[in-house]
Amino acid sequence: QVQLVESGGGLVQAGGSLRLSCAASGRIVSINTMGWYRQAPGAQRELVARVANGGSTDYADSVKGRFSISRDVAKNTVYLQMNSLKPEDTAVYYCNAHIVNVARFPGQLYWGQGTQVTVSS
């Protein structure tokens, strides 16, 4: 069993900062990618940022220059530093990871339960 545990969400004023973290635990051979998605009420879930095993990153246009994703491979943990937060960033943020848990077999996608981020104006 593999689990992703998120932390760091909460309330913040516009212009403020939050740092989210997500730690994967369980049977893990390797992790190919880790990332963050978000979903606001009445909206579709969208990619926020992701980082591959080799270190390459990808960001949604709406967060470029404000958010930064990083990864601690040894700790199976991914972080999302969110700066200059805006009310439109308000959403439930979900951690996602593509994890290999049996050697020589394709990996599987795993999701965290989500953490609420609320930005007040």
Image (spheres, rainbow, N blue to C red):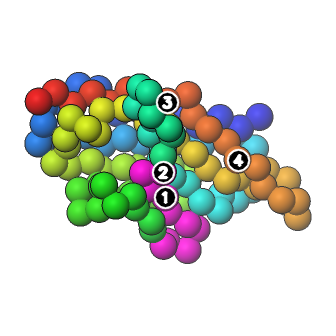
Q: Residue at x 43, y 56 (%)?
A: 49
Residue beneath disc 3:
114
Indicate the secondary structure of the residue bearing disc 4. strand
Residue beneath disc 4:
109
Amino acid at the residue labelled 3: Gly
Indicate the secondary structure of the residue bearing disc 2. strand
Sequence-wise, the earlier of marks 2 and 3 is 2
Sequence-wise, the earlier of marks 4 and 3 is 4
**Separation (CA) of disc 2 from disc 1:** 8 Å
Indicate the secondary structure of the residue bearing disc 1. strand
Q: Does the CB distance between marks 2 and 3 fall below 8 Å?
A: no
Query: Circle 4: is it few (<14), some (14-19), or many (20+) Cα within 10 Å?
Result: few
Q: Does the CB distance between marks 4 and 3 fall below 8 Å?
A: no
Position of 18 with respect to 38 (left or right) is left
Q: Does the CB distance between marks 3 and 1 fall below 8 Å?
A: no
Q: Is residue 77 magenta?
A: no
Q: Residue at x 44, y 39 (%)?
A: 38
Residue beneath disc 2:
47
Occupied quadrant, residue 104: bottom right
**What numbered label is drawn on residue 50?**
1
Query: Circle 3: is it few (<14), some (14-19), or many (20+) Cα within 10 Å?
Result: many
Magenta span dominant secondary structure: strand
Sequence-wise, the earlier of marks 4 and 1 is 1
